[in-house]
Image (cartoon, rainbow, N blue to C red):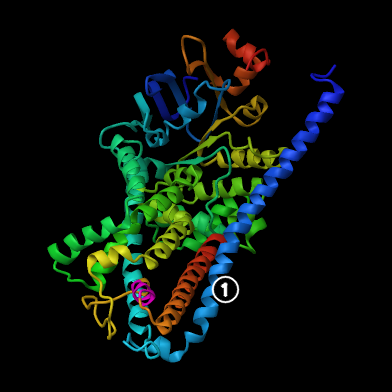
Amino acid sequence: MQNLDPILQTRGLSVYYDAKKAVTDVDLDVARNRITAIIGPSGCGKSTLLRCFNRMNDLIPSARVEGQVLFDGLDLYGHDVDPTEIRYEIGMVFQRPNPFPKSIYDNVAFGPRINGFQGDIAELVERSLVRAALWDEVKDRLKASALSLSGGQQQRLCIARALAVEPRVILMDEPCSALDPIATLAIEELMRELSEDYSIIIVTHNMQQAARVSHYTAFLMVEEARVGFLVEFGESRQIFTNPKDERTEAYITGRFG
Amino acid sequence: MSVISQSEFQRRRARRKWMGRAFFGLCLLSVTIALGMLALLLVYLLIQGATGIDWSFLTSFASRHPDKAGIKAAMLGSIYVVIVAGVVSFTLGVATALYLEEYAGRSKFAKIAKINIANLAGVPSIVYGILGLQIFVHSLHLGKSVLAGGFTLALLVLPIVIVAAGEAVRAVPPSLREGSYALGATRWQVIWHMVIPQAFPGILTGVILAVSRAIGETAPLIAMGALTFVPFTPDSPLSRFTVLPIQIFNWTSRPQAGFQEAAAAGIIVLLVILLVMNAGAVILRNRFQNKWEG
């Protein structure tokens, strides 16, 4: 664990919705060009934690963040940091595929366009779709509506859309929970390939998925007195075969959650 | 074991079925009354007015002689005023709705503003006429002009547009906003590229309703000082004018049968203009709506 090269680090991170705490004092290191899974029972603050990394919580008026999130040493919650710039470097894929009601092409081109991309946008769209393993399926109908794609294709389109702004980190909030097993496998395969070039954080309910795809796993829990605290963090192999904390063991063996 | 006896169940079931039929009958009766009245009105108008509509009726000005009286000035006046009202209420209404929904958000101010706007929709239209007279005609020195009339009607229908546009903006799925923000879009870009295009069909529906109301309004324009006898076409935004409902109102108050016929013909013209405008807006709306549905 000492040799982990962190791209993102949280220090004493807490999140409140009004007075209600959702994440408590989390110190977590996210490894560069690896997949980090965040697991835990419902309501343990996994998604809230994930949304701290690209400041999506800013969009919720009642949310308040304490502590630090360091992105290669830069505090994302510093006074002079513009959240839109962060989101340009840290992309996100959501729980339910949310393609825009536009053509497949325009979905992928949206990010580069709003960020003022000047180069060859057609080439960038193709590259992103190839990278998201969707190009062969859609290359003949780029002008078709994105909503005409299947759920799994839509999710890969959302991944292509995130890749098109060339982020360094991709956040995935239960990206397979609305998909069937075959589409899920395709996304997992894709994540493994992407992890060569991108740092990926995935929130998942599915422990097999975390064990299959991730290099590192963080286990969050909720107790009566404390919400959203980090119980254990380590290499996924160790977490899933030889957890140090008995609460982790109880969760991964299905005794609660 | 059941909760009630078999015979009791049968008796109650018969009653429930009867209730269902009675309710269906009531609904059917309401529809029949509503549509029946409308059909009666249309038939009456067509019988009275259809013979009065010809090319010279559409291209002549008002006259003291019923058979020479035409509707040109009122028709053009109505179209001009409604265009001004439509453009102004659309612009102001959409901007207001966007402010209240996207910028003011959950603030107390936004809540109070929304309640008041909803209440404004119920203020008698003549009050807007008096307001228009004071603000546009007198204070802004626009005179009793097309522009002043259009602005007055815009004020009148603004609440309708704001409420409808606000609902349309609220109905844009949060997932689309989040998706755009997550790609680094600024608030302005999210509103411009995502919220407005998505809300546009709903906004158009509101504008259709608003313009339909504006074109039929008489009282506020009379209060504001529109003319009743106009033997010229409005040639500039500052020219004086009359509108169809005023012309019709004027004709119906005349004793001659010829003017009664002209009034009926005028109503038909008004209905046709209304239908054309609505059809245009509906076609536009459907084109926006269907484009990307999967």
In which image quadrant can residue B59 be found? bottom left
- A220 or B35, which lies in front? B35
Give the quarter of the figure containing the C terminus of chain B: bottom right
- Magenta stretch mostly in which secondary structure? helix
- B131 or B92, which lies in front? B131
The residue type indicated by label 1 comes to Val
Q: Which residues are magenta?
A: B246-253
Question: For the point 27% across and 77% down, which residue is it?
Answer: B241
Q: Is residue A62 above or below residue B171?
A: above
Question: For the point 48% across and 47% down, which residue is it?
Answer: B171
- Look at mark 1 in the image and give the residue it sits on: B43
Q: Is residue A155 visible?
A: yes
In which image quadrant can residue B210 be found? bottom left
In which image quadrant can residue A17 be found? top left
Residue A111, percent across and down? 45, 52
Give the quarter of the figure containing the N terminus of chain B: top right
Residue A148, percent across and down? 64, 55
Q: Is residue B294 visible?
A: no
Q: Is residue A160 above or below residue B152?
A: above
Describe residue A130's horizontal placement relative to residue B5 as left or right.
left
Is residue A131 located in the magenta-colored stretch of the structure?
A: no
